[in-house]
Amino acid sequence: MAKADIELKIPSAVFYIEPVRAFIGNLAQSLGFPRKRVADIQLVLDEICTNAVHHGSANAAVGVKLRIEIDAHALEILVRDTGSGDAKRKNWLTHERLSEIEANRSPSSESGHGIFIAKSLSDTHEMQSNEVGGTDVRVVFHLLKSSNTEL
Amino acid sequence: MDSTQLMKLRESSGIKIIEIKTDLSSYAASDLRKVLEGLLVEKVDRVVVNLSEVSHINSTAVGALVGVAKRLRQSGGDLKICALADNLTRTFNLIGASSVLEIYESENSALAAF
């Protein structure tokens, strides 16, 4: 398959995550990912978009941007937000904040699991500040090297 | 659209049963929290959440279930989960929520556990 890029922009509202989740599921299935891996990809997409909407959408008019790259070997998703708008932690995912979230996460926590899920279920997970003052989250799922290839 | 319409409430022997008929991404998870907190306001103390028709759940929804279960236990009640699909079980296990929530294979077994 030739490499292809897909770009989406959704309003900063959780309502729009579900249709994107359905889209990415259909895409992953079409690319040949096993059923369980499709569910993983959908869950990771849901979690990182939810974080972007809840924590990185001070400028709601800009929305949340997604760039999806596909080729014969992998599905890559980049989710870009515009920051929290809080001057003290404009980029909501500073290293300090990440450490705090990870240290406080427990089975009885009501929140703070999203990043852990994204890290656990993707083949590659990267987070970094972007030039618009927000956070970019990049995840990659390898088609042939998927950690869970069970049908 | 308000997804609370896809969360059906029933009662059996004084136990409230919520049957979820929608996938639980963040939008529906917010509505699930509203439904559960409505039960807390009504002083309901025993709840079973039937997830047999749910094929996706995110950590926001699991967090809502954990939070309400904790609050119910403080007043002597509980919230039990039943009928999880395999990928939902995987999500509960990954987060660790399976060690916090009581999860049963069927609605009848969840009801019998009260």
Image (cartoon, coloured by chain):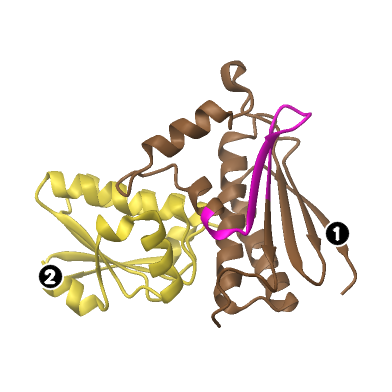
Q: Position of residue A21 (x, y in %)?
A: 63, 62
- Residue A98 is tagged as none
Q: CA distance from mark 1 to mark 2?
A: 51 Å
Say which amino acid is labelled 2.
Ala
Q: Which residue is mark 1?
A: A5
Q: Bounds of the magenta span?
A: A120-138
How would you rate the neighbour count of disc 2 (Cα within 10 Å): few for under 14, some for 14-19, many for 20 or more?
A: few
Choose top left, top right, bottom left or bottom right for residue B45: bottom left
Element assignment for label 1: strand
Please tell me which residue is depicted at 60% across the width and 59% down the height of the picture: A18
Quarter containing the C terminus of chain B? bottom left
Q: Is residue B95 visible?
A: yes
Q: Position of residue A143 (x, y in %)?
A: 70, 71
Q: Nearer the viewer, mark 1 or mark 2?
A: 1
Tell me where residue B11 appears, x and y as whole percent: 20, 69
Magenta run includes residue B79: no
The reply to whether residue B31 is visible in this rendering is: no
Locate residue A50 relative to residue B108 in the image: left or right. Answer: right
Q: Chain of mark 2?
A: B
Q: On the picture, is B50 further left or further right than B53?
A: left
| Host chain of mark 1 | A
Question: Which chain, by letter, is brown?
Answer: A
Q: Residue at x 68, y 36 (%)?
A: A128
User: Which tint was used for chain B?
Assistant: yellow
In the displayed structure, B68 sits above or below A68; it is above
| Quarter holding residue A53 | top right
